[in-house]
Image (tube, helix red, strand yellow):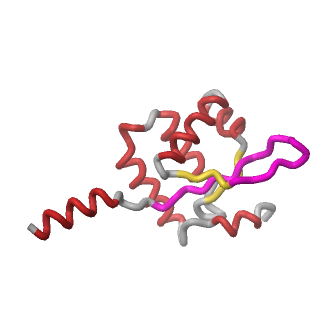
């Protein structure tokens, strides 16, 4: 129970909800993501069980476990955030030491474009 501060960042009511969102994100963005980017999402999800949807991991830890470079992790995290799959929680560094970042897996929300297209077709 060392990571109780993560409770304030929980994004899902259950692991099943988180898993469903991850599956939806993967289905929509599958061809836009590299194998490493998909593996990172699953790695974050596997570390987000106690505090559903949020974890505290170092980029170097992710890189070592997936056998990829730390630069690849940073580049992938940026892309995943731009796609709305994850969010990096802003944090302060203690004494200038690089610590682990807090990452939140975001709930899948269908794009408003697809909802609008569906509504337009239904009203014609």
Compared to 21, does 65 lie above or below? above
- 9 and 96: which is toward the camera: 96
Residue 90 x, y percent position in the rendering? 70, 53
Q: Quadrant where the N terminus lies?
A: bottom right
Tell me if 86 is positioned left or right of 115 in this view.
right
Residue 34 x, y percent position in the rendering? 45, 33
Compared to 86, does 51 lie above or below? below
What number of labels is visible? Answer: 0
Write the residue at 58% across / 60% down: 53
Kindly indicate the quadrant of the structure image that contains residue 54.
Answer: bottom right
Q: Is residue 95 magenta?
A: yes
Tell me if 32 is positioned left or right of 96 in this view.
left
Residue 56 x, y percent position in the rendering? 71, 52
Compared to 92, does 50 lie above or below? below
Write the residue at 49% across / 51% down: 85
Q: Is residue 120 magenta?
A: no
Write the residue at 48% across / 41% down: 38
Residue 123 x, y percent position in the rendering? 12, 70
The residue lying furthest to the left in this view is: 124
Compared to 65, does 18 lie above or below? below
Which secondary structure is most common in the magenta stretch? loop
The residue lying furthest to the right in this view is: 95
Q: Quadrant where the C terminus lies?
A: bottom left
Tell me if 78 is positioned left or right of 28 in this view.
right
Residue stretch in magenta: 90-107
- 30 and 47: which is toward the camera: 30
Write the residue at 60% across / 56% down: 104
């Amino acid at each position: 129970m060392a990571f109780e501060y993560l409770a304030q960042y929980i994004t899902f009511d259950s692991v099943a909800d988180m898993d469903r969102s991850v599956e939806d994100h993967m289905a929509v963005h599958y061809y836009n993501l590299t194998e490493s980017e998909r593996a990172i999402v699953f790695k974050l999800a596997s570390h987000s069980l106690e505090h559903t949807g949020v974890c505290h991991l170092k980029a170097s830890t992710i890189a070592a476990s997936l056998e990829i470079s730390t630069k690849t992790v940073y580049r992938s995290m940026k892309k995943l955030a731009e796609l709305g799959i994850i969010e990096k929680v802003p944090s302060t560094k203690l004494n200038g030491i690089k610590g682990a970042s807090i990452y939140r897996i975001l709930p899948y929300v269908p794009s408003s474009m697809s909802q609008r297209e569906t509504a337009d077709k239904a009203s014609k």
